[in-house]
Image: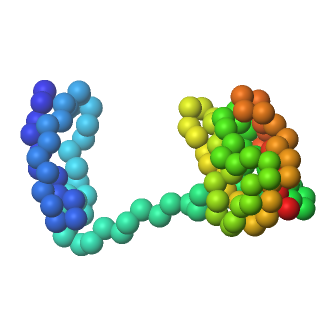
């Protein structure tokens, strides 16, 4: 059975259609739950955990992969000067790219893996001094 519902989110009403699969198996909401759902009290925004850092160092000048995956590409070449926050490389895992950024400035001295190589979390992929 298809039911039309009006849902209000942050004071803005939305009309939706929902399919009720088994109405007999779903008990009706209690009066207390109904009053909570219709309350106009503000709803707190969701809190998300802090994202993992996009780069990690594994010793002086070493830039490590933040996760296991495939090194897709470098955004720098040997001899390039980089500043804090510059994009250094891209690592892909499960069809999602993660960009590795410089945590300190310096000159790219060595690229330790080739694009297409598998890398482990914490594995050094370049040296920046």
Question: Which quadrant is the N terminus positioned in?
Answer: top left
Question: Which quadrant is the C terminus positioned in?
Answer: bottom right
Decide if residue 27 is in sight here. Answer: yes
Tell me, what colour scheme is on the image? rainbow
Q: Is residue 119 left or right of residue 15?
A: right
Q: Position of residue 36 (x, y in %)?
A: 24, 63
> Who's the residue at 19% across and 70% down the image?
40
Q: Where is residue 89 in the image (x, y as percent from the top left)?
A: 68, 46
Q: Which of 36 and 113 is in front in this view?
A: 113
Q: In this view, does 64 lie above or below 25?
A: below
> Who's the residue at 62% across and 48% down the image?
99
Q: Which of 21 and 60 is in front in this view?
A: 60
> Which residue occupies the extreme right position in the image?
59
> Which residue occupies the extreme front position in the image?
79
Q: Is residue 18 above or below residue 75?
A: above
> Who's the residue at 42% across and 62% down the image?
46
């Amino acid at each position: 059975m298809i039911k039309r519902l009006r849902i209000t989110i942050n004071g803005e009403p939305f009309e939706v259609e929902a399919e009720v699969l088994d109405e007999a198996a779903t008990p009706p909401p209690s009066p207390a739950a109904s009053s909570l759902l219709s309350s106009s009290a503000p709803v707190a925004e969701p809190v998300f955990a802090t994202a993992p850092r996009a780069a990690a160092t594994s010793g002086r000048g070493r830039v490590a992969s933040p996760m296991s995956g495939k090194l897709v590409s470098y955004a720098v070449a040997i001899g390039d000067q980089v500043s804090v926050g510059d994009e250094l490389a891209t690592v892909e895992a499960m069809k999602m790219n993660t960009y590795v950024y410089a945590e300190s400035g310096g000159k790219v001295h060595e690229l330790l893996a080739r694009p297409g190589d598998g890398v482990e979390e914490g594995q050094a992929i370049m040296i920046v001094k």
